[in-house]
Image (spheres, grey):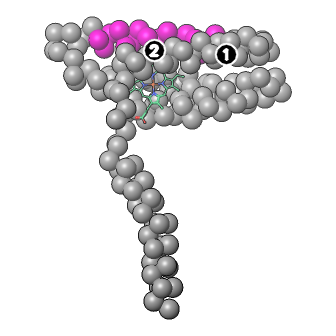
Amino acid sequence: MTNYRCFLTALALIICLPIARAEHHEKEEEKTPLGEEMSAINKAWRQIKKQAEDVSQNEETLKLLDQVIENCKTAVDMVPILSEEVSEDKRPAFIEAYKKEMMKLDKQFESLRSALEAGENGKAQELIKKIDDFKKKGHKDYKPEDD
Ligand code: HEM
């Protein structure tokens, strides 16, 4: 019986500890306003990538993309948290450069929009790859490194 109790206690701990840790982790990492926009882009972007090859889903894909474009336009006028670590004299140029990159991202989303509207799903998939590369570069230059 004691053994059984020990077993149950251990089992409860094994199940509950990771959940408690995950919750703690979430609270610890509060998102910045720009982080919120990026997360919204990310969620829709994942879905867009899943269905981009399927012409029959273009109408739905375009709706998702419109949402992404809206978030992107909002993000253009935001300030990356990393700018706080840039010296004051270089900060305006850093923010301006970020802005320009985000405007380029917006343009690429618009090109993707045109490709999907034209039913050119092959081209759309190529553009998606380019956008993913662009994202990598953008994160390398403007996003704090993950710890
Ligand atoms: C498809 C394109 C992109 C996607 C899906 C994406 C996604 C994300 C995600 C998931 C985060 C983390 C959000 C969080 O949990 O806090 C993030 C953060 C960030 N991204 Fe992007 N991103 C994209 C493009 C870009 C580009 C092109 C740039 C820069 C020109 C950029 C700059 C940043 C910055 C600066 C952050 C950190 C947030 C902050 O500074 O407050 N992202 N992004």
Pointer 1 local density, CA inside 10 Å: few below 14, some 14–19, many at least 20: many
Q: Nearer the viewer, residue 95 or 144?
A: 144
Residue 103: percent from left, percent from top: 47, 11
Which quadrant of the figure has residue 9?
bottom left
Residue at (51, 85) in percent of width and height: 4
Comes first in the chain, label 2 or label 1: 1
Residue 73: percent from left, percent from top: 48, 20
Q: Which residue is mark 1?
A: 113
Residue 136: percent from left, percent from top: 48, 18
Residue at (30, 27) in percent of width and height: 81
Q: Nearer the viewer, mark 2 or mark 1?
A: 2
Q: Answer yes or no: disc 2 within 8 Å of ligand 1.
A: yes
Pointer 2 local density, CA inside 10 Å: few below 14, some 14–19, many at least 20: few
Q: Nearer the viewer, residue 29 or 35?
A: 29
Q: Which residues are magenta?
A: 94-112
Amino acid carrying label 1: it is: Arg
Label 2 SS = helix
Residue 75: percent from left, percent from top: 43, 23
